Image: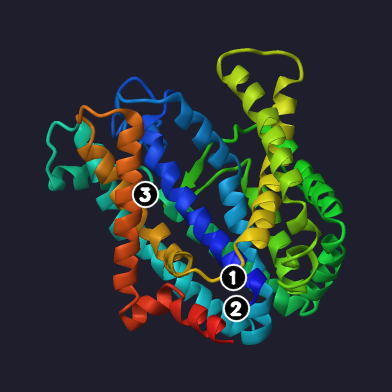
């Protein structure tokens, strides 16, 4: 793998670790409800707060708020980077077959096998009859099928189908998008301005109708109506950057973006404050003129600056091979698929433990990450498991 490809692979592994950390801390937010939420009573708030623990720490609210505002945008951006080279190499038909195998099959398995197991302890917290049979009767009576983190897979699959359609209709569209991002190598600030402009046009009208934490769900398909257009833009922005190449332009290992990483980190911190301060005031009932607009602008600026800041940091410092990081990157997808089961069960088991919130979160995070990592590594020893996890593709990339 080239230096830039290796850095981006490590960044993807880091992003998955942050997903596990985010979910591990949710049970210990100071803004959690006062008590566990009933399982079969609308609006089914346990989907956002699966386990409600009495041990809490305000620091986790800040940490989770920051992860919430940028993390999925980063994952969609990173996912888009590899799409056009794959389409050009495989063609539309083979590309879609591989996408359905790697995203559609795990989505179905995660949805119908892993999610019931993950949410079973959520039901047990407030259940009169905690048996599996009673849980299952309540589960199938829900007016939707809870998808947990699996929502990312179906939405990413839909974006990949759209990219394949674009490839069929306009085979040179990727190169055109790549040329638009070519100048970003010397002028990442201009790329940022163009990205933020598109995001603002997509998000600001929806922000007047939907909150950023609001979800909609149709059967097993969940999405955030205000943020979904942002995800589209990040995915296709990544597609354009990836079409131009990983070792030149914006993602050049020693390019302008990588060299200016401190500026992007400072900008990210400022943009986060621009969002979190007015958002906190709004949540607590403060209704000053223009406050919601300021928060909306912060939500547009912070994810964009965070994505570029993290890319800059990893391009600058994480372009070397290290066995631990390499293993994490190899198993990142599998960790994402299975970690939620371990997170919720560990939080449930620690509910009544006389331990501080920080210690509980550390136990949950360490246990969930270790177990998910080990399970994924074991699955990848089976040929079909290695194919679903993309292990063969990564091994071929490293051999080049």
Residue lying at 53% horizontally and 30% vertically, measured from the top left: 62
Q: Is residue 221 in sight in this rendering?
A: no
Q: CA distance from mark 1 to mark 2?
A: 6 Å
Left or right placement of residue 343 versus residue 395 in this view: left
**Residue 10, picture quadrant:** bottom right
Chain-order first, disc 3 or disc 1: 1
Chain-order first, disc 1 or disc 2: 2
**Residue 360, picture quadrant:** top left
Residue lying at 68% horizontally and 75% vertically, measured from the top left: 84
Q: Nearer the viewer, mark 3 or mark 1?
A: 1
Front residue of this view, candidates 266 and 377: 266
Q: CA distance from mark 3 to mark 1?
A: 37 Å
Do the residues bearing badges 1 and 2 touch, measured as CB atoms within 8 Å? yes
Residue under label 3: 145
Mark 2 crowdedness (10 Å alpha carbons): few <14, some 14-19, many ≥20: some
> Residue 322 has which mark?
none
Kindly state the secondary structure of the residue where label 2 is placed.
loop
Residue lying at 32% horizontally and 56% vertically, measured from the top left: 370
> Which colour scheme appears in the figure?
rainbow
Residue under label 1: 6
> Residue 1 has which mark?
2
Q: Position of residue 296 (x, y in %)?
A: 70, 32
Q: CA distance from mark 2 to mark 3?
A: 40 Å
Do the residues bearing badges 3 and 1 touch, measured as CB atoms within 8 Å? no
Left or right placement of residue 58 versus residue 354 in this view: right
Kindly state the secondary structure of the residue where label 3 is placed.
loop
264 vs 179: above or below: above
């Amino acid at each position: 793998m080239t230096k830039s490809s290796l850095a981006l692979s490590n960044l993807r592994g880091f992003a998955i670790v942050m997903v596990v950390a985010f979910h591990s801390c949710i049970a210990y937010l100071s803004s959690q409800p006062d008590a566990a939420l009933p399982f079969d009573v609308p609006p089914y708030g346990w989907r956002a707060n699966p386990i409600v623990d009495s041990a809490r720490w305000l620091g986790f609210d800040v940490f989770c708020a920051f992860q919430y505002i940028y993390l999925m945008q980063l994952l969609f951006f990173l996912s888009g980077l590899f799409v056009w080279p794959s389409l050009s190499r495989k063609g539309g038909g083979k590309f879609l077959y591989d996408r359905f195998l790697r995203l559609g099959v795990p989505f179905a398995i995660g949805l119908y096998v892993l999610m019931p197991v993950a949410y079973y302890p959520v039901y047990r917290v407030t259940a009169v009859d905690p048996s599996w049979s009673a849980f299952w009767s309540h589960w199938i009576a829900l007016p939707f099928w809870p998808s947990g983190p699996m929502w990312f897979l179906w939405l990413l699959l839909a974006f990949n189908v759209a990219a394949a359609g674009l490839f069929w209709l306009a085979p040179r569209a990727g190169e055109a998008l790549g040329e638009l991002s070519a100048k970003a190598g010397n002028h990442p600030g201009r790329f940022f301005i163009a990205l933020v402009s598109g995001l603002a046009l997509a998000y600001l009208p929806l922000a007047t109708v939907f909150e950023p934490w609001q979800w909609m769900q149709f059967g097993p398909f969940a999405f955030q109506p205000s943020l979904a257009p942002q995800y589209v833009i990040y995915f296709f922005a990544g597609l354009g950057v990836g079409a131009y190449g990983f070792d030149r332009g914006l993602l050049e290992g020693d390019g302008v973006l990588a060299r200016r990483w401190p500026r992007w980190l400072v900008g990210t911190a400022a943009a986060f404050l621009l969002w979190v301060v007015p958002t906190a005031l709004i949540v607590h009932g403060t209704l000053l003129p223009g406050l919601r607009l300021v928060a909306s602008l912060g939500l547009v600026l912070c994810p964009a600056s965070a994505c570029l800041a993290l890319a800059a940091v990893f391009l600058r410092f994480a372009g070397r091979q290290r066995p631990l990081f390499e293993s994490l990157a190899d198993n990142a997808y599998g960790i994402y698929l299975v970690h939620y089961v371990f997170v919720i069960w560990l939080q449930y088991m620690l509910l009544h433990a006389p331990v501080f919130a920080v210690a509980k979160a550390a136990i949950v995070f360490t246990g969930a990450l270790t177990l998910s990592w080990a399970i994924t590594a074991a699955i990848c020893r089976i040929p079909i498991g290695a194919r679903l996890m993309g292990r063969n593709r990564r091994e071929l990339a490293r051999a080049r």
